[in-house]
Amino acid sequence: MKTKSLLAILLAGSVVMTGCNSADDAKKDDSKTKTQETTKDASSTADLQKEVDAYRDFALDQLDKFTTETEKFVAAVKDGDIDKAKEIYPTARMYYERSEPIAESFGDLDPRIDARLADLKDEGKGAEDWTGYHKIEYGLWEKNTTKGYEKVADQLLADAKELRGRVETADVTPDLMITGAVDLLNEVSTSKITGEEEIYSHTDLYDFKANVEGAEKIFTILEDKLKEKDPTLAKNLADKFKAVNDLLAKYEKDGGYVSYTKLTKDDTKALSEAVNQLGEPLSQMGVVVE
Amino acid sequence: MTKTNDDEKLLDKKITRRQMLKVTGAGAAGIAIGASGMGGILKAFGKDFLEDDDTSATNKVNFYGKHQSGIATAVQTNIYFASLNVLVKSKKELQELFQMWTPLAVQMMNGNVIGVYKNTLIPAKDTGEAKGLDARNLSITFGVGPSLFEKKELGLSSLKPKELKDLPHFPKDQLEEVYTGGDICIQACADDPQVAFHAVRNLIRAASGKVTMKWSQAGFNSFPMKNGKKQTPRNLFAFKDGTENPTTSDEKDMNKVVWVQSGDSKPWMTGGTYLVVRRIQMHLETWDRTALSEQENTFGRHRDSGAPLGKKSEFDDMEIERKDANGNYIVPEDSHVFLAKKAKARVMRRSYSYSSGVIDSTGTYDAGLVFISFQKNPEQFIKIQNSFGRLDKMNEYITHRGSGVFACFPGIKKGSYIGEALFNTL
Ligand code: HEM
């Protein structure tokens, strides 16, 4: 990089030395109009095929496991085994949350699997249109029952399988990975950290962890390429992921996480700040395509 | 911000002849300088040498100068005040933070968008909401709080001026932790709320991972115009606020009241000043049911004209000792102005009103004054506030909820950076 800057200054130097006033005018122009040129994104310039393939494999594997775990969850619900269903619920969802950039790219399936009642209400729909994990969550934790949720469970499994099938056709690109990583963290900042994702089970920290892992996976896949472009950024990201993970580890309990309701305001603030401090450099990861 | 980005900024930047001459020191010599020489020059000037006050920019306040902007600068209509805590773990990192902020502050005070962007997979460096607006007289003032010097890992304890300490508890203080203290303050003032907010937002964003926000407060002022001249703004009690203040153009007076003189404090503070901020709730509901005469007795001035009680115009001499036929003070002894004068201390006030919604527990306005004063020693503020004590008639209508003291660095010389004196003293 050093050579580049020297070159830059020399080039600039020679131009102004011969250019007399023109450079001054150019500057005036610059500050008056505040022009900023946006050139087309450069996603095609760097070869990231290997990375894209790796990410597709990861997502497929996650959604394979999601289907298997959902199968178990659905079986427990249909057996009326409330404890077992409650046990599987948070961990099964983690596979979905990790691969959300891809899972969510099917606009019709995501709401069927993952909608909260509040999301439906925003769209003018009601409880009768509600399906998926959160509906069963409501039954399990609010009503302490599985009765009447059998059909929802069947539908959930069918949707999970359909999702798995359709992922084969998903158009995985570097853009999707780069924006996906930031989106995962945004999810954490806007709903997980506020406890608005799992309002009955309060298992938000599982989703939190899974979202972070999903983003971290994308980073690890791109890490070598990123090191070539911007080693400082790569190092900073590794540090910031570690900071978030270390903080989350404080809330581990019995192989899982404590209930969101156990978090104090100071806890959520610390988590939220750590996520924001990770998100800002993460948003710079797009330099890998340059 | 990484090295790479900075270097690339150089690549993209149009360099003017003037700037180039400044760097190389002489015209044609520039061409002759080899790569290594150029590198040395680049280093010597720091990578920020390209940012300078753009004197052709409209509504522009200068960044560089003997003192920081936003102190003697004519009061603007809006403020966004932010108090930050630092996460950095060494003096060097702290220094780098202020170095990194310097060119951003200059660019924003020039009314320019910061950074260039090419890659649409990366968010733009500038958050963008000030685009198309000119500089709007933006000023940015940086200060450091007592808590910064208590962070052992920063190794600044020997540089802490003895004047810089948390204010004592005053009678009737109801300070809330969420509006109190902070390691660093940024005071952004502009004749536009969005420009002021944008400045703080972009500085904080660029410092991601290095600072956290502790508290912030937006505020506003409105200036009636008379014969094309700005008049004293009114606070939310409808009284003109800022009448009795040092004249900022009177350098002698400013040196007496505001600017730290050599020998007054730690050497790095020479040319700087101390900022006191108080977030003071004003109980508008009770005020609004108080008789006008009582309101005027509270301050010792007439509401509409701003004149001292019994006088005609705002700037008439107060003559605080005036008595009526019965031998009573015309300006009541428990009035705000009487007690302020009694303290025999002066400060430069630069306050803004705020209104931040409704207080949940009472259903009343959360509104009041972001009181800000500058003085060469916080003791000046303390004297006045102690003189108010329990006596000030105004106490009935206000509650102090937030507080901060910050040492504001002296002005920044071209080629230097914010707070350099603090980092270069041993
Ligand atoms: C909500 C709180 C406050 C309100 C509404 C308020 C309002 C006023 C008003 C209306 C005046 C008269 C006009 C003028 O000279 O500007 C004044 C004067 C003054 N105030 Fe305040 N003030 C507040 C808090 C404070 C505080 C905390 C201090 C602490 C230092 C202070 C110090 C002064 C001084 C020094 C004067 C000038 C007195 C003179 O020499 O005439 N004020 N204030």
Image (cartoon, coloured by chain):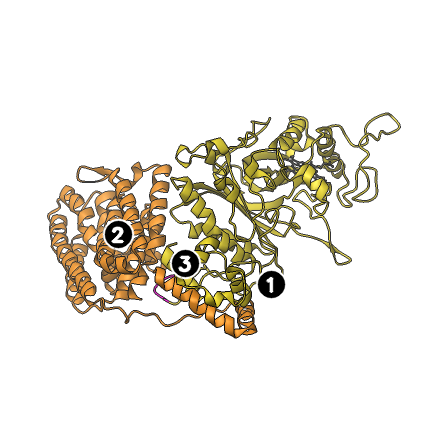
Q: Secondary structure at mark 3?
A: helix
Quadrant assignment for the N terminus of chain A: bottom left
**Horizontal side of residue A155 vs B161, given as left or right:** left
The percent coordinates of residue B289 (x first, y second) are 68, 38
Magenta span of residues:
B119-123
Mark 2 residue element: helix
Instruction: Say if mark 1 contacts mark 3, CB within 8 Å.
Output: no
User: Depth-wise, is mark 2 or mark 3 nearer the camera?
Assistant: 3
Q: Is residue A241 left or right of residue A34?
A: left
The residue that label 2 is drawn on is A211
Q: Is mark 1 within 8 Å of ligand 1?
A: no
For marks 1 and 3, give the one nearer the viewer: 3
Q: Are marks 2 and 1 on the same chain?
A: no
Q: Can the viewer see residue A161 in this picture?
A: yes
Q: Chain of mark 1?
A: B
Front residue of this view, candidates B327 and A132:
B327
Q: Write down the colour of chain A.
A: orange
- Percent across and percent down for residue B88 are 39, 42
How would you classify the magenta stretch by its main secondary structure?
A: loop
Q: Is residue B122 magenta?
A: yes
Residue A212, position as x, y percentages in the image = 26, 50
- In the rendered image of the structure, the colour used to display chain B is yellow
The residue that mark 1 highlights is: B57
* Dot 3 amino acid type: Asp
Q: CA distance from mark 2 to mark 3?
A: 31 Å
Q: Which of pointers 1 and 3 lies earlier in the amino acid sequence?
A: 3
Q: What residue sits right under mark 3 in the picture?
A: B6
Ligand 1 shows up in which quadrant of the image?
A: top right
